[in-house]
Amino acid sequence: MKTRCPFCGRKIRVVWEFHGWSAYCDRCVMDMGHYDTKQEIVDALSGKKEPILKPCPLCGNKVEMSEFEFEDGKPSYLVNCKFCRMDVGFFNSKKKAIKTWNKRKR
Ligand SMILES: [Zn+2]
Ligand SMILES: [Zn+2]
């Protein structure tokens, strides 16, 4: 399988764990999630699905995407860490929110 880390370009490590496949990048020390099939990993990392959110740069915990609807009726997306409450603000597209979050350093 030639799947590379979307962040550093290194080949990822895929391991069978708890009835599913887990993908890791050893260089970024990043867990890229748990999948039912290897094909799902390929799809997720090749950008066919939503890009993966990097873990929180402050505490290293997994972060979540939340959808909000404000008074104007348009959806807004917020990526934030439930542990240290870091966020990068609201965005009108999921892609933008993920991109901004992934660029964020400490
Ligand atoms: Zn990487
Ligand atoms: Zn955090």
Image (cartoon, rainbow, N blue to C red):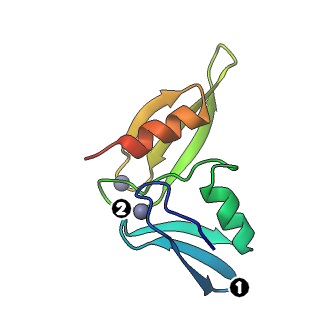
Q: On the rendering, which quadrant does ligand 2 occupy? A: bottom left
Q: Earlier in the sequence, mark 2 or mark 1?
A: 1
Label 2 CB sits under 8 Å from any ligand 2 atom:
yes
Mark 1 C-beta to ligand 1 under 8 Å: no
Q: Residue at x 49, y 72 (%)?
A: 24
For image coordinates 65% across by 13% down, the residue present is 72
Provide residue 11's location: percent of width, then percent of height: 49, 69
Q: Nearer the viewer, residue 3 or 24?
A: 3
Circles 2 and 1 in contact, beta carbons < 8 Å: no
Which structural element holds mark 1? loop
Question: Up-down: is 17 above or below 102?
Answer: below
Residue 89 vertical placement versus 84 (above, below): above
| Crowding at mark 2 (Cα within 10 Å: few <14, some 14-19, many 20+) | few
Q: CA distance from mark 2 to mark 1?
A: 25 Å
Query: Looking at the image, which residue is at 44% across and 66% down?
Result: 10
The label shown at residue 95 is none
Q: Residues within 10 Å of mark 1 (few under 14, many from 20)?
A: few
Tag 2 residue? 60
Residue 32 location (% of width, % of height): 53, 65
Q: Disc 1 marks which amino acid? A: His
Residue type at mark 2 is Gly
Q: Residue furthest left?
A: 106
**Across the whole image, how many numbered discs are drawn on residues?**
2
**Farthest-out residue, top:** 72
Q: Residue beneath label 1, please?
A: 19
Image location (x, y in percent) of residue 19: 71, 85
Report the quarter where the N terminus lies: bottom right
Q: Is residue 89 above or below residue 4?
A: above
Q: Secondary structure at mark 2?
A: loop
Residue in the picture at 65% in, 86% down = 18
Q: Picture quarter containing residue 88? A: top left
